[in-house]
Image (tube, rainbow, N blue to C red):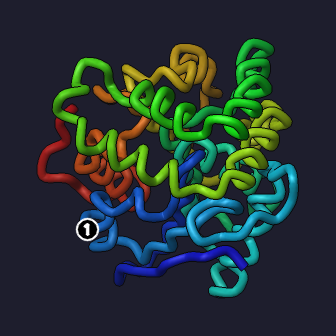
Amino acid sequence: MLHYEKSGQGKEHLVLLHGFMENLTIWEEMTPQLSAHFTLIKIDLPGHGKSKVYKEVHTMELMAEEVKKVTDSLQLNSFHLLGHSMGGYTTLAFAEKFPEVLKSITLFFSTYLEDDAEKKEQRQKSLRIIKEAFPNYVNAGVPNLFNSNEKDILEGKIELAKKIALSTDNDGVLAAVKGMIERTDKMEVLKNFEGKILVIAGKHDNAVKNDITLKNLPDRTNIKSYLIDCGHNGHWEKPGICAEIINTELLHHLPKKLVF
């Protein structure tokens, strides 16, 4: 089973799924604010953190099925699911397969759109670089995921993100890339899901096409979106604001002041 950690004392359960080349430690800065209101289940996705590599290709559906084994083992039958980037793709796959156990889904700097042809080609090309020069791949790519206007301020966070990425199993990284290439558009999931849908996006996110993602969200009363002043990694760039939005939207917890 996937490695996970449980914390917090809240009556509501929130399952957190990290992104590509990350692990469950990425939620550290948001945890104090969230654990006051939720019981948190932080999971290492297949081939990441302390979770093993399962197959040569980790589809989002495979990841979702492994996450379900964790939630079943904890006897969770009504919970909130949040995923960052690749974790968001897994969240959508989970919502498609197991909607009956979900109270809400949160796309955290993620999208329901499938990769376009250019993005798929980039991912295909990256496979060779990951195999042959993984440190170069990490050192070149990770800084671009942060707000370029705040690189100096975020230097420590960027180094932490690199360190976590470099600790990721190479086969796990390759399996995840192959799985992301295969993923399909999930607009129908958003149209059919009956629980709350929360979308949190970054104004300076180079990894997600926010203009299309936000513009084309279905016009439904259960969907709420936020665009905040950061890059792709709100959990590191704006942890307080992100945690406050999650508390407010998923629990109707009234913030003292919500500033963007």
- Classify residue 204 by image quadrant: top left
Image x and y of residue 135, in percent: 53, 39
**Can residue 111 be seen here?**
yes
Question: Residue at point 17% right, 36% down?
Answer: 259
Q: Secondary structure at mark 1?
A: helix
Q: Mark 1 — residue?
A: 32
Q: Residue at 72% across / 81% down in the picture?
A: 72
Q: Work out whether residue 186 or residue 168 is closer to the camera in this orientation and state it.
A: 168
List x then y, in percent, for residue 183: 81, 37
Q: Is residue 224 visible?
A: no
Q: Is residue 46 above or below residue 123?
A: below
For residue 254, what is the image quadrant?
bottom left
Whether residue 17 sits left or right of residue 175 in the image: it is: left
Q: Quadrant of residue 202?
A: top left
Q: Position of residue 213 (x, y in %)?
A: 59, 23
In the rendered image, residue 132, in percent from the top left (x then y), is placed at: 69, 36
Q: Is residue 142 above or below residue 116?
A: below
| Quadrant of the rendering where the N terminus is positioned | bottom right
Tell me: residue 233, above or below residue 248.
above
Q: Identity of the amino acid at label 1? A: Pro
The single residue placed furthest to the left in the displayed view is 256
